[in-house]
């Protein structure tokens, strides 16, 4: 019986300490952090550029020595600007809903839901798409210096599958 009581007390103590630490972490994160706010604002400029196709503000948010890591290799800031233009042509009605964003003085993590219609260029079938992406950006002095993007393989495979034409009659 003592062992059970001791174990129960230990578990309760652990949860009490964990809850106390979690609440202090939450209050700490709500404090103003000018560097984090600047990084979040820069990330929003990049997200808006992809959605609108307008890369004119990229220099204010992305460092000149930026490296974007992708499955096709690393790209610089000028390549990023070109990709924004290409993406707008490939996905003319691209919609990017920011589901959650978290940032500090070095990183910004953004969970995005992207949806719209592909025009069938760039190796992707024409038709609707809808997927989630986790965007991770590293910042220095308020500008993105590195970027990684992660998507769920299941959603990517569904996007790459040819769309069924439901308008044809049998």
Image (cartoon, rainbow, N blue to C red):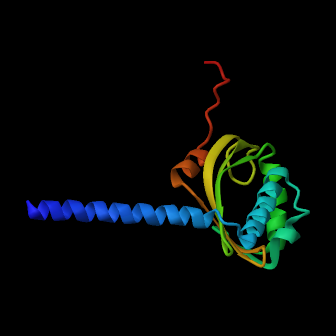
Q: Quadrant of the C terminus?
A: top right
Give the total number of marks visible in the rendering.
0
The residue closer to the viewer here, 36 or 22, is 22
Q: Is residue 7 above or below residue 93?
A: below
At which x and y percent is residue 90?
78, 50
At which x and y percent is residue 84?
81, 59
Q: Is residue 81 above or below residue 98?
A: below
Q: In this view, does 93 lie above or below 107?
A: above
The residue closer to the viewer here, 63 or 74, is 63
At which x and y percent is residue 132?
61, 50
Residue depicted at x 54% and y 54%: 152
The residue closer to the viewer here, 62 or 40, is 40
Q: Is residue 96 left or right of residue 53?
A: left
Q: In which quarter of the image is the N terminus?
A: bottom left
Q: Is residue 145 above or below residue 165?
A: below
Residue depicted at x 85% and y 66%: 58
Residue depicted at x 80% and y 72%: 62
Write down the quadrant of residue 107 in the picture: bottom right
Which residue is at the far top? Answer: 170
Q: In this view, does 131 lie to the left or right of 9?
A: right
Residue 111 showing in the rendered view: no
Which residue is at the far left? Answer: 1
The residue closer to the viewer here, 102 or 76, is 102
At which x and y percent is residue 98?
68, 51
Write down the quadrant of residue 79 in the picture: bottom right
Residue 117 showing in the rendered view: yes
Q: In this view, does 25 lie to the left or right of 76?
A: left
Which residue is at the far right? Answer: 56
Residue depicted at x 64% and y 43%: 130
């Amino acid at each position: 019986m003592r062992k059970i009581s001791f174990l129960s007390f230990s578990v309760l103590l652990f949860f009490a300490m964990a809850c106390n630490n979690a609440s202090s972490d939450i209050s700490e994160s709500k404090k103003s952090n000018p560097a984090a706010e600047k990084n979040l604002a820069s990330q929003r400029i990049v997200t808006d550029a992809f959605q609108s196709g307008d890369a004119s503000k990229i220099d204010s948010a992305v460092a000149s020595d930026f490296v974007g890591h992708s499955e096709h290799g690393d790209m610089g800031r000028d390549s990023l600007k070109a990709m924004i233009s290409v993406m707008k042509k490939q996905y003319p009605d691209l919609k990017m809903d920011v589901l959650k964003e978290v940032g500090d003085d070095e990183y910004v993590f953004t969970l995005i839901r992207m949806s719209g219609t592909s025009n069938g260029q760039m190796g992707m079938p024409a038709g609707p798409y809808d997927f989630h992406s986790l965007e991770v950006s590293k910042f220095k002095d308020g500008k993105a210096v590195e970027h990684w993007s992660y998507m769920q393989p299941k959603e990517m495979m569904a996007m790459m599958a040819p769309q069924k034409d439901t308008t044809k009659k049998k």
